[in-house]
Amino acid sequence: MQASTTGTEPLKNLEEWDDFVASRYKPGKSESEFRNYNADANPTVTEFYRQNHAHQTLDYVLHKKAEYGKLNRGKKSIWEAAEYLNTLVDESDPDTDLSQIEHLLQTSEAIRKDGHPRWMVLTGFIHDLGKVLCLYGEPQWGVVGDTFPVGCAYSDQIVFPEFFEANPDSKVPQFQTKYGIYEPNCGLDKVHLSWGHDEYIYDVTRNYVPEPAQYMLRYHSFYPAHKHGAYRHLMNDHDAEMFEWVKKFNPYDLYSKGAEKPKLKELKPYYDELFAEFFPDKIAW
Ligand SMILES: [Fe+2]
Ligand SMILES: [Fe+2]
């Protein structure tokens, strides 16, 4: 099943966005190099951000949160969700058999090798399961992409800030002040971020995983904050403390790709036990 290329979907597959992020933060790359992307060299990613920045309005985000917050898309185990996500394949990649599960396992295995707690290994495995949004028919710009707060001024630390011109919210003065609809240091839990796979997997799993894991899941694509320190004025001290975990998680998401191919068969018993430690057989999606 090829669910990621319709006429309006700019990315060949969702990994194209992940690859773009990874190349942006290649070790040794400076902050100023980070700003210098060549739109011509990256036409699909550029078009993706054009759509993402134009369509992610406060109103859209509130609607998606309400819609998916019901968790009425059926009950699935973690394995079932991972297998479902795996049906999202990339025609251009001949080696697609385990592509989605592979990224999850490479992330979680890298975390495990470094001796981190079991809940963090678990987080590595589940962090991108929210991409099943794509299989529900959501457009790429509503599934992946760096996240950013809506309902307040856009930080210049967000990639391609010029594309916010086309967002209807940019014409709403109330949404364009520093704090917008929020109070100073109100805490991120009160702040609506652009909708995507982070918020969805957070919502699905929030009752089962410890708080640092919730932060990792919910904010792993919030690059303006965890990489660039933006939006500290909306965060409270507890957020700042928890973001140390988000930062700890990020390298595993970015750089575990291309690591050894994980052997699912061998690893399965470990993960069966790990999932059972935190989750009931099936959870609501
Ligand atoms: Fe992700
Ligand atoms: Fe990821």
Image: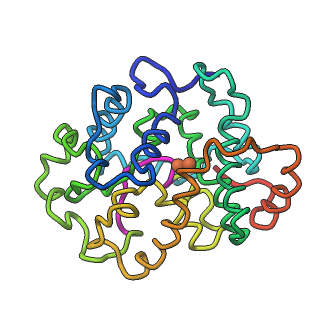
Q: The N terminus appears in which quarter of the rendering?
A: top right
Residue 227 on image: x %, y %: 38, 61
Q: Is residue 64 in the magenta section?
A: no
Question: Is 228 placed left or right of 108 in the picture?
Answer: left
Q: Residue furthest bottom?
A: 237
Q: Is residue 208 above or below residue 79?
A: below
Q: What stretch is highlighted in magenta?
A: 190-199
Q: Residue at x 34, y 45 (%)?
A: 60
Residue 232 located left or right of residue 117: left
Residue 77, percent from left and from top: 76, 50
Q: Is residue 238 visible?
A: yes
Relative to 139, say whether 167 is above or below. below
Residue at the spot 44% in from the left edge and 49% down from the top edge: 26
Which sits in the foreground, 31 or 233? 31
Residue at figure coordinates x 40%, y 76% from the top left: 240
State left or right for residue 15 relative to residue 110.
Answer: left
- Quarter of the image for residue 132 reads top right
Decide whether residue 192 is among the magenta residues: yes
Q: Where is residue 118 in the image (x, y as percent from the top left)?
A: 73, 68
Determine if residue 62 is in view. Answer: no
